[in-house]
Amino acid sequence: MTNIYLVRHAEAEGNLYRRIHGQYDSLVTDNGCRQIAALAHRFEGIHVDAVYSSDLFRTRATAKAIYGPKGLPLTTRKTLREVSMGVWEDRTWGEVARTDGRQLALFNATSRDWQVEGGETFEQLRGRVSAAIRQIAHNHPGQTVAVVCHGTAIRNALAVFQGLSIEESAKLPHSDNTAVSLLQFDGDAVRVLFHDDASHLPEEISTFAKQRWWKRESGSLADANMWFRPLDMEREEDFFRQCRGEAWLNIHGSWDHYDGDAFAKDALEQWRCDPNSVICAMLGEEPAGLLHLDLRRDADKGIGSIPFVYMLPAFRKRGLGVQLIGQAVSVYRPLGREYLRLRCAPDNLVAQRFYKRYGFRRVCSASGTRVPLDVLEKYIGYGE
């Protein structure tokens, strides 16, 4: 008999930023790194003969918790990848809910009718991943193997191994990040000894402990999915000025040194070069925030500059702001930028804590500014 520990990857950017990352190669979050440490502790006393993962970064990074301490090589298989989401890849769930709501409902229901351009069907996913796991078991008779894979892929493979149809697989629970299932193969027969166990995760680092969507609950802004649109600086400049002014007054307590005309002029010039420079964050049909990017500044240094990040007062402290960081990553990473960089007042403690929580670190003090500002930076590259 062969034992297969089937492990979901640690928390990754798609989980945090509420973006659709099927085969998009996203990074593990800081919280995901803590989950990886907990997973390593879980496997300390478990004998493992071989470790496999998909070839995507988030599974390879998670697999290191198992193969690293045991001195084993990692074998990657493209056939263990997450479901391909086609033209949905790296779009926000909020955008797809608006533009392709029927197909999103079919996806959430695990319907065999779900299909998006360039993507897989659930039938194709089930066949691909279950066959890959069976082949691994066949290659390791009588051994114990860890396989690090993805949430939707694991859920559908578990359905196949339990004899469930596509429709019946919708009844299976979702798994937390780094959750573990144990399969036992005896020839062609397979038993699921346990599934989706995340008992190694303290509540404070569990992804599911901070989310509600998987419980089918509603009304939680913390799980609300935003979408983004370019802000028309010729028609909506007043909104930009309103956001900039409110932020300045809230941080500094007075209008001293404030130059709204200069802020608006810079944004207008950058917007005319690229409309994606000034972006409105939307929750449903209501503006919730503003993101201003300077696509030219420090481009030669591999830096994605962010002059302004803002949430409207009604939407603050609701767990939504991180989605604006995700949008900045989505714009800058395809341009080859390896860092995000922004400025933050040293005494703006709320913002300082927010940025630190999501991976920014202080690199220096800004020079030539109207008021004292720290320069904060976040790495978004694929360095291992």
Image: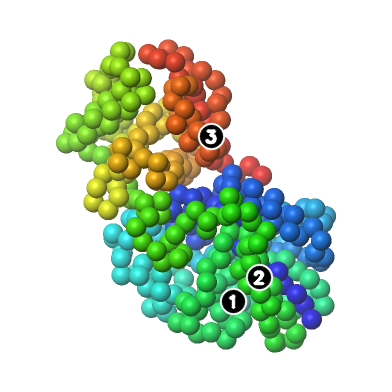
In the image, what residue type sits under mark 1?
Leu
Q: Quadrant of residue 290?
A: top left
Label 3, label 2: how far apart the Cα atoms are: 33 Å
Residue 121, given in percent of the width and then of the height, sits at 45, 74
Asked if one can make out residue 371 in the rendered structure from this viewpoint, the answer is yes
Please give the name of the residue rendered at 63% of the width and 78% of the height, measured from the top-left corner: 131
- Give the residue at the far left of this rendering: 235
Residue 82 left/right relative to 144: left
Which residue is drawn at the image coordinates 53% and 38% (left, top)?
357
Checking the image for residue 33, the label placed there is none
Which quadrant, please, contains the C terminus? top right
Instruction: Please identify, in this view, whether the residue under mark 2 or under mark 1 is nearer the observer.
Output: 2
Where residue 185 sits: x, y (%)? 73, 81
- Label 2 neighbour load within 10 Å: few <14, some 14-19, many 20+: many
Residue 181, numbered label: 2
Q: Any mark on residue 356, and which?
A: 3
Point out residue 4 in the picture as x, y percentages from the top left corner: 72, 72
Dot 3: what SS? helix
Q: Are marks 1 and 3 in contact (CB under 8 Å)?
A: no
Is 311 in front, or is 21? 311
Precedes in sequence: disc 2 or disc 1: 1
| Residue contact between numbered discs 2 and 1, judged by CB atoms under 8 Å | yes
**Secondary structure of the residue carrying numbered label 2:** strand
Cα distance, mark 1 to mark 3?
38 Å
Q: Which mark is residue 158?
A: 1
Q: Position of residue 328 (x, y in %)?
A: 42, 40
Q: Is residue 348 above or below residue 9?
A: above
